[in-house]
Amino acid sequence: MLKKLRIGIALWLLFAGGISFAEEPKSGGTLIIGRGGDSSGLDPAFESDGNSFMVCDNLFEQLVAYADESTEIVPGLATSWEMSPDGLSYTFHLRKDVKFHDGAEMNADAVAFSIGRMMKEKNVKFFKDQWNFPQKYLHIANYWLSMEMDKTLDSIEAKDSATVIFRLKCRDAPFIANMAMDFAVLVSPTAILKLGENFKNHPIGTGPFRFSKWTRDDLIILDANKEYWNGKPYLNQIIFKSLPDNSDRFSELRNGTIDIGLFPDPEDIESAKKNEKLKLISQPGINIAYIGFNHTKPLWQDNCVRQAFAHAINKKAITDAVYSDLGQAAKNTIPPTMWGYNDDIQDYPYDPELAKRLLNEAKFFNKLKEAGQSRITLWTMSIARPYNPNPLKAAQMIHDDLKNIGIDLQVVSIEWTTYLKKQRTQAPDMDLFQIGWSSDNGDPDNFLGVLVDGLANSNVRTQWKNEEYHNIIVQARQAVSKEERVKLYRRAQEIIHEEMPLMNMAHSMVVCPMNQKVMNFKLHPTSSIRMKNVWIK
């Protein structure tokens, strides 16, 4: 009895004294992230790749943000906002005393400038600063265009220094979620006007880290923003190191020369589980790996041909070999964890004989000769991505499957940043292209509109044009209820299945190995890499 009493007193003293078993975060140190390739640029308005955005996530901020581990919308540089009853205007109320890294004030004029610079017709009203927009950008605001933002946004008004009003041309259900995406970051107008196109190499935002150095194809260094409005980050410095080879990247992680190794091979994940110096975090990815057709060529405008390819490629075998147990074969363009997913759709079975019959019925080989081709090409990424850990292995298996039905396929692998730019041109020497997508905002429109609807804009990677499909996507954006949007998106997925504008290949788990000393690093559904609250043990 006395022994129990002493234990009880000891426990009471322990908790009454406020002692916690959780480790307190420590400040200081440099953390090195190994990734598959370099960034294209560091001005998010003009980029579209994850390797650029993962750096920008720590340099810039938006009016609204996604919660730490979900796509729930929370305050960002705006503390609050209201939507008008008709859904045609949004009023944002800004934080005060927030500075850009160059000391310029973050205010309503800076908001109007940051978003207004992407508008084709710059219907922008400033409150005080009266910024003049650069006459011309050499780069294209790909996200802005592919999401048809010029058809959505009518005007921006800086009502006073802390209030900005966005007026829309039509209702847009995903608008507030879209405003948390990377392209909608706030930038320093003084820096843009001073640096011009060179801003992408010397970015200035309001985020928890500041840009320090960029050695192309090697590393990008960020330093802590000691004056950050939401408290100084724990780390002194982050280094994003480009290590294209998956095995080399994991080797450096195992040897301790990097602290986090993004996009590992499945076999390296098994090795990491057995290494006491490493730990793993994982979550289902909101993503899709797919194969697109070059719809600008007559060869690929017959959906009978496209369906034949769907039967010819052994999707299940490729998923098993490339992803192991960390992926699943995809039958829809949106993942099964996303609202609006149409589970009633039945995927095309692997059937090489049926594929041959469909190709013969479509006179594919005659059309190939008429096009002056004896073989077709598959353009593919040279580096691992969150949605595909080994694109070259997948490409080789696709090559073998197509050879099995008499098609000679040439795999073309191009350096990542060059690939992103060249693929958009829909070059005539490109027949198929292998790529993928990770969710930006948790909304089906971010997949079904941005990836597939070629009538929306020429920057949509899959330049497939279908009037019924386009009208459905427009209706879904303007729909009042979620139930109506679900119905429309289910039909959109049926059309994709019937017309086969792209071949949905796989959805992947996202797994990240890291050193045991890395604390509080979290994966995000949008693939953001957020380092503000990370610390080193």
Image (tube, rainbow, N blue to C red):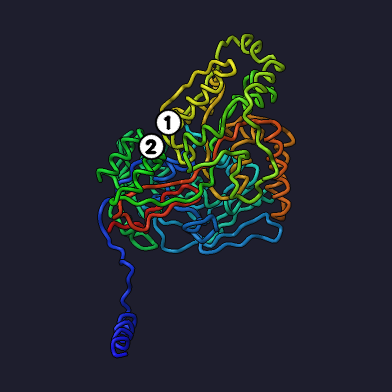
Which residue is outermost to the bottom? 2
* 296 relative to 117, above or below: above
- Please tell me which residue is depicted at 41% across the width and 54% down the height of the picture: 522
* 220 relative to 100, above or below: above
The residue type indicated by label 1 comes to Trp
- Please tell me which residue is depicted at 31% across the width and 88% down the height of the picture: 5
The residue type indicated by label 2 comes to Gly
Q: Please provide percent x and percent y for residue 230.
A: 39, 62
Q: Please provide percent x and percent y for residue 146.
A: 59, 38
- The quadrant of the rendering that contains the N terminus is bottom left
Q: Is residue 422 something one can see in this rendering?
A: no
- Please tell me which residue is depicted at 33% across the width and 68% down the height of the picture: 22
Which secondary structure lies at badge 1?
A: helix
Q: Nearer the viewer, mark 2 or mark 1?
A: 2
What residue is disc 2 on?
A: 36
Specify whether 128 is left or right of 199.
Answer: right
Q: Please provide percent x and percent y for residue 64.
A: 52, 57
- Please tell me which residue is depicted at 30% across the width and 84% down the height of the picture: 7
Is 466 in front, or is 84? 466
Mark 2, other Cα within 10 Å: few <14 / some 14–19 / many ≥20: many
Is 348 in front, or is 213? 348
Marks 2 & 1, CB-CB < 8 Å contact: yes
Which secondary structure lies at badge 2?
A: loop
What label sits on residue 499 in the rendered view? none
Count the labels in the image: 2
Quadrant position of residue 206: bottom left
N-terminal label among 2 and 1? 2
Quadrant position of residue 252: top left
What residue is disc 1 on?
A: 416
Mark 1, other Cα within 10 Å: few <14 / some 14–19 / many ≥20: many
C-alpha gap between disc 2 and disc 1? 9 Å
